Amino acid sequence: MNKRFTLLLAALGLVSPTLVYAQNELGNFSATGRGGVINTFATDYQAVGVNPANLGRTGGSRVAFTIGEFGVGASSQSLTRDQLKNFLYHRDDRLSLADKQALARSFTSKNALNVNAGATAFGLSVKLPVIGGIAVSSRQRVVGHAALNRNAAELLFLGSDAPIYANYNPNSGQVPLISEVLDGSEVQASFLNEYNIAWGKQLISLPLFQLSAGVGYRYVQGYGVLDIRIKPGDLRAYSSLSPVFNIDYSSVIAGNPNFNAQVNGGLEKTGKGHGFDLGLAAEVGKMIRLGVSVTDIGHMTWEGNLITANDQKLKRLNSAGVGTYNFFKEASEIFASGTDSLFQYQASQSRQANLPTKLRLGAGLRISEFLETGLDVTLPLNQVAGNIISPYVGVGVDYKPVRWIRLSSGVSGGAGYKVGIPLGITFVSSVYEAGISTRDVPGLITSKNPYLSVAAGFLRFRFGKAD
C-alpha cells in the first residue's frame, strides 16, 4: 500500500503544493467519462462512498470486482496551458524574475491550480438473496483547494521582494496582521487512505416502485492535511504532514516536547478516523431511478507532526520565494510549516477535524440496455480540507453503439471547475471491462482554462446476474 500511495503523492508533487477541491470519482474510470455523474449508475462496489443503497437495487451483477482503477487531474482557471505543462514536464527548470512575476499574476485567483488524484486499489461486491448487497474496497484520495489573493501570490513567488514589503518597518507599530494582508486566501489539502465496507438492501418491492436503503463505514488513515483559511481578523491554520513530504521544521518546533514528531521517514500516517455513509435509492416504473445520500459523516484525529497557527503580525520572509517549477517543498516552507514560514506555528498534540461531508442527489433514466442518462447534484455540508468549495452539477450519458463498446459523455461544472465536456470509452464483454476516460476534452487542448485529466481501469470483472 505504501508504494501505491507514494505514487499518488508523487503525481501531485509534479504539479504544485497548492491543491484544490475535487470530486473523488477520478478513481473510477466509467464515472469520469460522465463527468463524475454516478449516483444512479453505480450498482456494485462503485456505490461505495457514493450511495450504499444502490447495493440493494435489483439487477446488476451478482459478483463484481476490480484491481487498480486510478485517475489523475490538473486544472486551472488562471494559468495558461503552457504554464500548467511546465509544472508537469519541466520541474527542475529555474524561474527567472519574469517567470516569477507572471506566475504571481496567474496565481492570483480563487481557482489557480486544481490537482487531484484517486485510486481504487481493490473493490469487491456480492449480492446475496435475503441479505442484500455487500461491498468492500480500498481507496486512496488526494484532494485539496487553493485560493490566493494578490499579496499571497506575490509572497509565494517573490518572497522577500514582494511589493508588500516596500514600506515594511517591523518597528513602526503599523505592521498589518497577516489576516488583513492575505484576506480571502485558502490553502487546503488532504491525503487519505481508506478501507470501506458497505451494505444495501431492498425495503419495498412493488410492481412499479422499489425502495432500497444502505449504510457504509470506512476506517481512514491520514497521511497529511494542510488547512489554511484566512479572513480579516480570523486566521486558522494547521498541518499534519507525513515525513514523506520532507518538511524542515524549525528547531523551536522540533525541540518542543508537545511536538509529536514522526521522524522515521517515508510514508507514515499522521492521523486516523472513522466515516459513515447513508443512502436511499428508488426505482419508479421501468425507467426512472432516484438516489439521495450523505457521505463522509465523521471525523479525523490528527496527531503526527501537528502544528497550528493563529493570527499575527506580518513578518519578512528570508527567501526569494519559489525558485523552480518543482516547488512543493519551497512553498511548504512559506505557507506550511518550514523554517521560513509566514506563519508562526505552535507544536500541538492532537486536533480533531470533520471529514468532507456531502449531500448527493441523483436522478436517472434507463431508456434501454444500450442507453442510460443521469443527473447528479453534490452539495458540500462543511468547509474542511478535501471538500468541494461549491455545488457540483453534472449530466451524463452511457451509450452502447454495439454490445462490446460503451461510450460515455455529458456536461458538468461547479466545485471549483469550469464547465467541462467529459468523454470515456469502455470495452465490454459478458464478464470483463476495461476503459479510459477524461473529465474534460476541451481542457486537454485549450490555452485558457486547461484541464489535464485521465482515468483508467483494465481489471474490472462482473459475474452472474443478480435477481
Image (cartoon, helix red, strand yellow):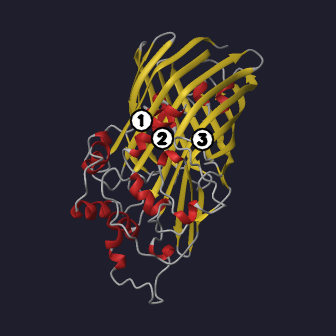
Q: Amino acid at mark 1?
A: Gly
* Disc on the earlier residue, 3 or 2: 3
195 to 378, vertically: above or below: above
Q: In terms of secondary structure, where does tag 1 sit?
A: strand
C-alpha separation, residue under disc 3 versus residue under disc 2: 11 Å
Q: Amino acid at mark 2?
A: Gly
212 to 189, vertically: above or below: above
| Camera-side residue of 376 and 145 | 145
Q: Is residue 335 visible?
A: yes
* Disc on the earlier residue, 3 or 1: 3
Tell me if label 1 and label 2 are in contact, CB under 8 Å. Answer: yes
Q: Position of residue 124 (x, y in %)?
A: 61, 21
| Camera-side residue of 121 and 49 | 121
C-alpha separation, residue under disc 3 versus residue under disc 1: 17 Å
Q: Amino acid at mark 3?
A: Leu
Q: Position of residue 320 (x, y in %)?
A: 32, 66
Q: Which residue is mark 2?
A: 394
| Camera-side residue of 425 and 157 | 157
Q: Quadrant of residue 310?
A: bottom right
Q: Which residue is mark 3?
A: 361
Q: In terms of secondary structure, where does tag 2 sit?
A: strand
Determine the residue positioned at 56% across, 73% down: 311
**Residue farthest bottom in this picture:** 172
Q: Which residue is mark 1?
A: 410
